[in-house]
Image (cartoon, grey):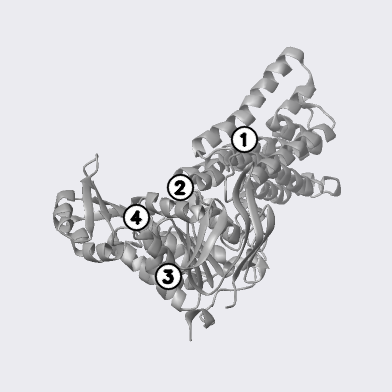
Amino acid sequence: MPIYEQTYRRYEARAPLRTLRFWPITREALRLILARRAFLGLLLVAWVPFVWRVIQVYIVTQYPQFGRVLPIDGRMFGQFLAVQTLFTLFISIFGGAGLIANDLRTGAILVYLSRPLTRRDYVLGKIGVLMALNLGVTLVPGILLYVVSVALAPEQFATWNLSWIGPAVLLHSLVLSLVVSLVALAASALSRNARVAGLTFFLLVFGLETVRRVLGWLYNRPESALLSIQASLESLGNALFGITDRALQLPWVYPALILFLVSLGCLAILRARVRAVEIVR
Amino acid sequence: MTSTLEYVRASRWYGPVIALNDVTTTVGPGVTGLLGPNGAGKSTFLKLAAGQLAPSQGEVRVLGKPAWGSPELFHRVGVCPETDAFWDGLTGLQFLMALLRLTGFDDGECRRRADHALEEVALTEARDRKIGGYSKGMRQRIKMAQSLAHDPQVLLLDEPLSGMDPVNRRRIVDLVKKLGREGRTVLVSSHILHEVEAMTRRVLLIHNGRILAEGDVREIRDLMDEHPHTVALRARDPRALARAVVGSPHVLSLTFGAEGEWVTVQTARPDEFYSSVVDAAVEAGVSEMYSPDENLESVFKYLVAR
């Protein structure tokens, strides 16, 4: 019987698709990132503000007179998450800059996309890495801080009128982690060099924040916050947690709109750059 | 013959440049060579079947499904890209395990399949070394290993012998033939007639984005006889290599490359030359071998002129 009339019988590969096809990408990348000691150190440092806030809650519950200098209320969570935003930026630089850039440089994107994965799965897998890391320093300590606060100071926090704190922490953590992750990933997709990608992200975030501060100082108008991703996130957080800061005092819809547009732009970059074949026109 | 790959009036443009022009053909089980000079459209032809490019016009189907936008298909398709596609910091074993996880296997199954694939390409001893430290030939073999580790029904191999030394070249040729004998559909591209001929007699000739001819490679071989075949070999001891091959009746001429490590040989009988050079290549430490495609280009020019 000629070879071409034989039918193939040894085939054992699985036919059905996984429900979470992106998960192996996320898991593999997390494993590699968390193997770096310096990165683990950064994650540990990112939990220092949590420890400080727990101490703050404890001190105020033990010595109520400190409540005037170290108030414990809903605003404390907004301020906590504003500090954590800074950590998400550093985590995204060191953990996210190479996520796509390295695959573009080494050509590994070719082997990813020759597996049972779509480009969407690939992007979801990569976003999953940054979301996991960023939520690990925002949502997890934020919710834990809320639980600890309720346990240590039930008279302040275990009341119906402060039950919004939990959902607010959840919402703000999700928004800030998603936006920061998308921007970091888009920066990573713009270059084949992880250092260049990291620098791009740094300039996008801290460069615009510097411009915002200079303009704010010159014109003293809160609208300058809309120029900066970091300030827009903080402005949104302030609106959510009832924090008053004249430099960032804007109706929540403006920063929300800016962050939405930034996210759309990042998705457009990812759509254009994540390809198995680079087409040079 | 049951066709596993079908191209129906498939065209692909890159901006104003047409890489594949109105191609209609089928490929069935067994090994099929995709033969054409550099820039002929071989990689585009393969990438369309690998679902990495969408056809600008027409349709490309693999195992009855459109190749573009059918990720489930790639449980049954293995792709060996032409260019390097690695994470250099991983060992060979880690690289295969990572890719098998992406295919959907659990850790135990990944390990079993990765070990088997490494054995198939004779990289078992190097499995715990980082890919960054692999030689060119080892890199080619680990790429082959990743393409077949999940036991695919269809294999798309883009220039798999590029840069390999004679011993590993022989090994991969034997592996490709074995995969074809098992009833898999293996489409292997090359710009070197001899390479394709060593693996199969069935070829598709592609030139300027069009399928010029398809059929038995021997007919092409007859046309080649009047064109000497050029082989460049990189050796640790090029002079020893030259001494060993210069007396061979199959060698028409021999020159040393400018960098001192390369020896370029012209032969009218590549089959016999390759068979006779294996022992000498091992002794002289040949690490790389390739064949420039000018000779094939001239055959294509001849075919087009006809």
Residue B197 in percent (x, y) is at: 39, 66
**Element on which disc 2 rests:** loop
* First in sequence: mark 1 vs mark 2: 2
Calculate the distance from the C-alpha at mark 4 to the C-alpha at mark 1.
67 Å
Give the label on residue A86, or none: 1
Disc 1, SS: helix
> Residue B35 at what x, y percent from top left?
47, 59
Amino acid residing under circle 3: Thr
> Which mark lies nearer to you, 4 or 2?
4
Q: What amino acid does circle 4 point to?
A: His
Q: Is residue A58 visible?
A: no
Number of the label disc, if any, that sits on residue B200:
3
Mark number for residue A243? none
**Residue picked out by circle 2:** A36
Q: Chain of mark 4?
A: B
Query: Callout 4 environment at 10 Å: few (<14), some (14 to 19), or many (20+)?
Result: some
Answer few, some or many: residues within 10 Å of disc 2's Cα (few below 14, many 20 plus, some between 14 and 19).
few
Answer left or right for B184 relative to A22: left
**Which tag is nearer the camera, tag 4 or tag 1?**
4
Tell me, for residue B227, which label it has, or none: 4
